Image (tube, grey):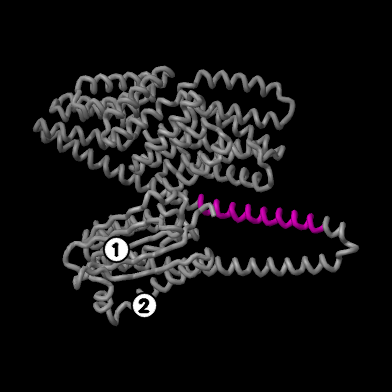
């Protein structure tokens, strides 16, 4: 369902097929009358764009023609637009790797055009479209931080261009990203923003956005508002004949009435959903509806009916090869037969459920592995493109500077020859000095950061080794799966001097979950981010992890009772304040307990962090401070508090 919602909002709804076919016919006639290759390339891309919801094969065919023509006449903007259209065709076919490659190439072309001084609206709009398309791919991969990064870039451009319709679509996609992360209040905020924009343009896709708003209210248990927006969504979807959107809405209405103990209306809406999905042969949606009905009758203890609908859902799920639905159907069948005391069939379906669940887990592991590889390739390609762009910018800047200096030299050659020569010499030396100083600072920062990574990996591998010895192979496999995800995040973040605070929180979350597994839930933790912290506010990666590790190993593990670790991020004046508080034995007691052992380990982490803070001070000219104190209540030790005060830094800067 997530994929359907995103694609509908990005690429228009299927209800517009007739109107788009008319637009295609009109553009084809205009293409036949085109008098030059520039107009032909532009019209080929426009025809391809109109085909995206009615015929993906034609979308790909016309986009390839546009690409071939644009390359031959060196029309960069339409070359990039053709690659975006081809990438959209790959999204529809599920080839995300190729789609991401094409979007990245289009992004590079558009950004190069902008840096070369081409500020035309078609270039800016094309770049925003490339950003938004990349956001879709990353959202489908559950790489929500990257998806949000590109969606925010896209919506910023659309806002500058006052493109209200496309702003609405990106707002909706951002809402879906927050919804997938169970941040319902943020999701609701963006869905409502999207709906307000859609009202201005009378966008027929309001029905889908209204359904999303209703779903947010339903998850917040505000059922009155949920029903209010479901009703508005129904009016729009019926008006524009969006059968798929209606099917999803009826399923949600069925769940709403079920929550209100209104069985009759719940069944009526699920029957309507069944009819809507059958009308467009949407077997995936139909299988969902049958599962809702089966679960409903199971809850009503009408087990034969539950078995009937579960079998129907199972048949549809096998046809569409959707493992999640196969697994859910087998579980419902097993439970239903068990309730009827038919142990033979219950056991049979339980075994099938276990097999389906194993297949689903294997499929998910393979998918994540492929996604990790794809993200790595994308990051590598993006870094190379960034370096290439920087090189071109430098060459362009140098050429411009040389041209200015030559002109100045010709005008004032007779009177100021000696002065100009001296000025040029001084400026070149100054530029070299400043460049060397800047590069030296950057290389020192990177060296310190890379020094931290082996230390972090060494500790993680030591944890895994210990866990294997203590808990056995099965638990170690689970631990290794989490560790592999953590390492992927670490590799992803370690290339950058700054990352969003949400990425640092994600990395800390994964690390602390690993330590919970290792020490058998010896401690609990929570991470709090103040709402005042902006999305583009940044922090050096892996800055807090050594302190969290020390708090666990030297503070919480030695205590007998269950420990707790609290991490918080707040903004105070011009500083980002990060605190790590544990209720362990206290820093001084910890030092006494480990006197004469592993002192090198401690000094390495703390010393490197202090050097990193010094580099931050040098680059920002703002004081960065580290404070470690023991918490006491009278003579009783309550734990340790680590406070980091960092200058406010932003990704955009």
Residue 44 x %, y %: 63, 29
Q: CA distance from mark 1 to mark 2?
A: 23 Å
Residue for point 60% across, 56% down: 387
Task: Tell me which residue sits at (82%, 65%) in the image.
Answer: 420
Magenta segment boundaries in residue numbering: 378-406
Q: Which residue is mark 2?
A: 600
Tag 2 secondary structure: helix
Of marks 1 and 2, the one in the foreground: 1
Residue 187 drawn in magenta: no
What is the secondary structure assignment of the residue under circle 1? Answer: strand
Q: Nearest the camera: 376 or 170?
A: 170
Q: Main secondary structure of the magenta part?
A: helix
- Residue 195 lies in what quarter of the image? top left
Picture residue at 51% right of the left edge, 30% below the top: 165
CB atoms of marks 1 and 2 within 8 Å: no
Percent from the top left, x then y, of residue 602?
35, 74
Looking at the image, the residue that sits furthest to the bottom is: 596
Sequence-wise, the earlier of marks 1 and 2 is: 1
The reply to whether the magenta stretch includes residue 390 is: yes
Residue 113 spot, x, y in % from top left:
66, 44
Residue 587 shows in the view? yes
Q: Which is more toward the observer, 618 or 360? A: 618
Q: What residue sits right under mark 1 in the picture?
A: 581
110 vs 460, left or right, is: right
Callout 2: 10 Å neighbours few (<14), some, many (20+)? few
The picture quadrant where one finds residue 284 is top left
Q: Quadrant of the C terminus?
A: bottom right
Q: Residue furthest right?
A: 414
Residue 163 image point, x, y percent: 55, 33
> Pointer 1: residues within 10 angstroms few (<14), some, or many (20+)?
many
Compared to 247, does 333 lie above or below?
A: below
């Amino acid at each position: 369902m997530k994929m359907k919602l995103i694609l509908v909002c990005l690429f228009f709804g299927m209800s517009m097929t007739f109107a788009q076919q008319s637009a295609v016919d009109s553009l084809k006639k205009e293409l036949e009358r085109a008098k030059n290759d520039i107009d032909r390339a532009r019209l080929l891309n426009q025809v391809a764009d109109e085909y995206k919801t009615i015929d993906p094969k034609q979308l790909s065919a016309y986009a390839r023609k546009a690409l071939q023509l644009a390359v031959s006449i060196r029309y960069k903007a339409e070359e990039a637009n053709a690659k975006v259209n081809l990438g959209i065709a790959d999204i529809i076919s599920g080839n995300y790797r190729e789609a991401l490659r094409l979007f990245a190439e289009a992004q590079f072309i558009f950004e190069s055009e902008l840096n070369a001084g081409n500020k035309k609206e078609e270039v800016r709009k094309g770049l925003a479209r490339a950003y938004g398309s990349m956001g879709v791919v990353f959202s489908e991969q559950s790489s929500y931080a990257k998806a949000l990064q590109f969606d925010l870039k896209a919506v910023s451009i659309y806002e500058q261009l006052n493109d209200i319709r496309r702003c609405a679509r990106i707002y909706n996609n951002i809402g879906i990203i927050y919804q997938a992360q169970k941040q319902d209040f943020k999701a609701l905020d963006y869905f409502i923003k999207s709906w307000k924009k859609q009202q201005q343009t009378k966008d027929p896709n309001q029905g889908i956005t209204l359904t999303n708003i209703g779903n947010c209210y339903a998850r917040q248990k505000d059922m009155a508002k949920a029903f209010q927006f479901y009703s508005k969504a129904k009016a729009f979807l019926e008006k524009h004949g969006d059968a798929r959107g209606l099917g999803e809405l009826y399923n949600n209405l069925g769940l709403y009435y079920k929550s209100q103990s209104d069985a009759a209306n719940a069944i009526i809406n699920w029957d309507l959903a069944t009819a809507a999905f059958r009308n467009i042969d949407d077997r995936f949606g139909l299988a969902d509806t049958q599962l809702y009905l089966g679960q409903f009758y199971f809850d009503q203890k009408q087990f034969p009916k539950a078995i009937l609908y579960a079998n129907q859902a199972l048949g549809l799920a096998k046809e569409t090869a959707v493992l999640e639905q196969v697994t859910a159907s087998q579980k419902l069948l097993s439970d239903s037969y068990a309730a009827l005391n038919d142990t033979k069939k219950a056991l049979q379906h339980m075994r099938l459920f276990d097999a389906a669940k194993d297949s689903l887990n294997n499929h998910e592991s393979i998918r994540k592995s492929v996604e990790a590889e794809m993200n790595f390739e994308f990051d590598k390609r993006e870094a190379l493109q960034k370096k290439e762009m920087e090189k071109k910018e430098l060459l362009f800047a140098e050429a411009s500077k040389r041209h200015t200096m030559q002109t100045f030299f010709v005008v004032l050659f007779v009177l100021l020859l000696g002065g100009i020569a001296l000025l040029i010499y001084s400026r070149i030396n100054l530029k070299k000095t400043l460049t060397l100083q800047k590069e030296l600072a950057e290389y020192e920062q990177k060296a310190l950061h890379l020094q931290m990574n082996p230390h972090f990996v060494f500790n993680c591998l030591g944890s895994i080794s210990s866990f294997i010895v203590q808990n056995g192979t099965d638990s170690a496999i689970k631990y290794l799966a989490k560790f592999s995800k953590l390492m992927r995040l670490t590799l992803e973040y370690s290339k950058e001097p700054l990352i969003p605070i949400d990425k640092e929180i994600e990395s800390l979350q994964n690390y602390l979950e690993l330590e919970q597994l290792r020490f058998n839930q010896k401690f609990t933790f929570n991470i709090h981010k103040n709402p005042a912290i902006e999305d583009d506010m940044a922090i050096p990666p892996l800055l807090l992890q050594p302190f969290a590790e020390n708090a666990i190993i030297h503070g919480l593990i030695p205590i007998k009772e269950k420990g707790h670790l609290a991490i918080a991020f707040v903004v105070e004046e011009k500083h980002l304040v990060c605190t790590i508080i544990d209720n362990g034995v206290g820093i001084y007691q910890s030092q006494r307990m480990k006197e004469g052992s592993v002192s090198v380990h401690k000094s390495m982490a703390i010393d490197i962090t202090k050097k990193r803070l010094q580099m931050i001070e040098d680059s920002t000219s703002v004081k960065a401070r580290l404070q470690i104190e023991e918490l006491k209540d009278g003579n009783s030790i309550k734990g340790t508090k680590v406070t980091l005060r960092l200058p406010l830094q932003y990704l955009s800067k």
